[in-house]
């Protein structure tokens, strides 16, 4: 991930994160980056100081310093993220977390050896594949894009 300082044609400054510089270039060409203040899509990279890592402990930002606004997502992307967030909250609220015992518990429920209920937990890709091949209904818990920033 890379964070760019950006400015619009009306001189508003803001920051936004991108997977890489090519992603910024592609989004800028398509007019997908909008100023959070005025909505202008005429955006360019602003001058920014490079981040330098030293052996000293990093200083925390001063609390009186306001964070720069982040570029907003379009309405469709905002709705999709909100739907994913809501779905994840519903799943967590209405399932039992069985942790690493998920493969065994899911198989026991499927085979009738444990009471039927909705569960969630962890499984390796191999364990999940074996459950699916055996007809056990499983699906991954949706990740939220915010979890990777």
Image: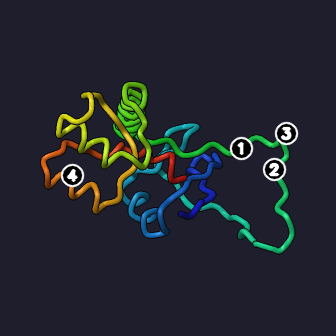
**Separation of disc 2 and disc 4 at Cα?**
47 Å
* Nearer the observer, 82 or 116: 116
User: Colour scheme in the image?
Assistant: rainbow
* Res. 17 image quadrant: bottom right
The answer to whether marks 1 and 3 mark residues whose Cβ atoms lie closer than 8 Å is no
**In the image: residue 88, left or right of residue 66:** left
User: What separation in Å lies between label 4 and label 1 (alpha carbons)?
Assistant: 46 Å
> In the structure shown, which secondary structural element does the residue marked by tag 4 occupy?
helix
Would you place residue 52 above or below residue 28 in this image? below
Residue 141 appears at what percent x and percent y? 35, 43
Mark 1 to mark 2 CA distance (whole Å): 9 Å
Q: Nearer the viewer, mark 4 or mark 3?
A: 4
C-alpha gap between disc 1 and disc 3: 9 Å
For marks 2 and 4, give the one nearer the viewer: 4
Q: Are marks 1 and 2 in contact (CB under 8 Å)?
A: yes
**Residue receiving disc 2:** 61
């Amino acid at each position: 991930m890379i964070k760019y300082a950006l400015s619009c044609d009306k001189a508003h400054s803001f920051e936004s994160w991108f997977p890489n510089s090519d992603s910024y270039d592609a989004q800028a060409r398509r007019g997908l980056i909008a100023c959070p203040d005025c909505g202008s899509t005429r955006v360019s990279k602003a001058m920014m100081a490079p981040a330098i890592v030293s052996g000293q402990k990093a200083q925390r930002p001063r609390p009186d310093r306001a964070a720069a606004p982040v570029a907003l997502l379009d309405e469709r992307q905002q709705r999709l993220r909100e739907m994913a967030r809501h779905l994840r909250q519903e799943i967590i609220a209405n399932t039992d977390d069985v942790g690493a015992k998920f493969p065994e518990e899911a198989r026991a429920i499927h085979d009738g050896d444990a009471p039927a209920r909705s569960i969630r937990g962890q499984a390796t890709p191999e364990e999940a594949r074996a459950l699916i091949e055996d007809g056990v209904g499983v699906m991954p818990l949706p990740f939220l894009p915010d979890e990777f920033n």
